[in-house]
Image (tube, grey):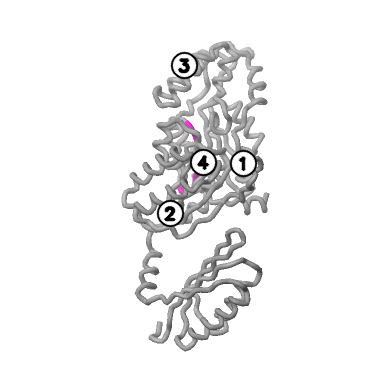
Amino acid sequence: MSQKDELILINISGNDKPGVTASLTDILAKHNAVILDIGQADIHNNLSLGILVQSSGENSGNIMKELLFKSYELDVTVKFYPITEQEYEEWVNMQGKNRYIITILARKLTAKQISGVSRIVSDQGMNIDDIKRLTGRIPLDETKRAPKASVEFSVRGTPSDKKQMQKAFLELSSQVEMDISFQEESMFRRMRRLICFDMDSTLIQTEVIDELAIRAGVGDQVKAITEAAMRGEIDFSESFRQRCRLLKGLDVSVMQEIAENLPITEGADRLMRVLKKVGFKIAILSGGFTYFGNYLKQKWGIDYVYANELEVEDGRLTGNYLGDIVDGKRKAELLRLIAQVENVDLRQTVAVGDGANDLPMISIAGLGIAFHAKPKVKENAEQSISTIGLDGILYFLGYKDSHLDEQM
């Protein structure tokens, strides 16, 4: 930068209309200005455009004069701010700092939610670079309102206390009914390729073993064991063996009736449609049963299903199972195995589940999500979704409704 060069920040605001940016940058081009930074946002047809330019001192006056005349003609407001070389160097140095993405999900966005997240970011000594809405615009008529809302913050800096920040996000999310994802911005975040789901109470809104137990007349006994296992109070493998024994003698014909009436989780159909469209490999890693996993495999075109096989003799369940139990440790092993087979880096994987036996795979995945999970699981998972359906995962992956609507 020569001594004669000047740095000017140009801020333009007003009603947006076609040709505004073109007309103003034509003037900059005419005077051979160098654009060092540029950003534009449009909120309710109101333009906010910022341009940081470098130009020779002899051209700066003409640039500002012509921009003022053109802005009056376009009915927009233009303001100029001189930037010192020191200020510019400090800004450049900021670019090397860590970057994070904070995504918030809710049924409805409120000022308390935005304010709470912004305050936590500020308290950690970090700076918000950009905020964008991922979900579609919300109608004023509540009966027509989109059932979900998501906003993404791009944040720069290093948290002074990352654990405390995560704790503050967890507390805030419970206070104002929203979910908060905090992810490091990297190329892996934008290149996820494999997603592994738990099945019961994740893809479907029931525990199939409980449904089988009801038909076998041992519903209360099995449900109590299931809930204790999901809370992490009983070893999963032992609880599984106990529950299987209680199913002895049940006619296998009930399995088809249960499969055909599985309560699919909100947002699952949309999520699967999008994941298949963009080329994800999808796996079910379940402590439930293969029969029901294969039913969902046919429904959604899922690539892998690993679950437990019930032993059948003379058309009835024996109370035993075949092969190894798919427990928490096995789920993590399977995630690693499938990633290896598909030549996918672990940082490109996603794992979603609700129970304590899902924590091992959630903890090793590039993006691990506790979905409508038990308290212990939520506390130990870095990301969680509790306020909306499974398609909330799409926003954690960075997808926008406007892009999805165009492609789907």
Front in this rendered view, residue 390 or 319: 390
Can you identify the residue that label 1 sits on? 272
Can you identify the residue that label 3 sits on? 242
In magenta segment, residue 351: yes
Judged by depth in the image, the label closer to the viewer, 4 or 1, is 1
Query: Tags 4 and 1 in contact by the CB under 8 Å rule?
Result: no
At label 3, which amino acid type do we have? Gln
From which residue to which does the magenta span run?
347-354
In magenta segment, residue 405: no
Report crowding for label 3: few under 14, some 14 to 19, many 20 or more residues within 10 A (C-alpha): some
Judged by depth in the image, the label closer to the viewer, 1 or 2, is 2
Marks 4 and 1, Cα distance to the nearest angstrom?
18 Å
Which badge, 4 or 3, comes first in the chain's sequence? 3
Judged by depth in the image, the label closer to the viewer, 4 or 2, is 2
Which badge, 1 or 2, comes first in the chain's sequence? 2
Quarter of image, res 156: bottom left
Query: Tags 4 and 2 in contact by the CB under 8 Å rule?
Result: no
Marks 1 and 2, Cα distance to the nearest angstrom?
27 Å
Residue 15 is situated, as x and y percent measured from the top left of the image, at 61, 66
In the image, is residue 37 above or below residue 151? Answer: below
Can you identify the residue that label 2 sits on? 100
Front in this rendered view, residue 182 or 242: 182
At label 2, which amino acid type do we have? Tyr
Marks 3 and 2, Cα distance to the nearest angstrom?
45 Å
Can you identify the residue that label 4 sits on? 338
Marks 3 and 1, Cα distance to the nearest angstrom?
33 Å
Judged by depth in the image, the label closer to the viewer, 3 or 1, is 1
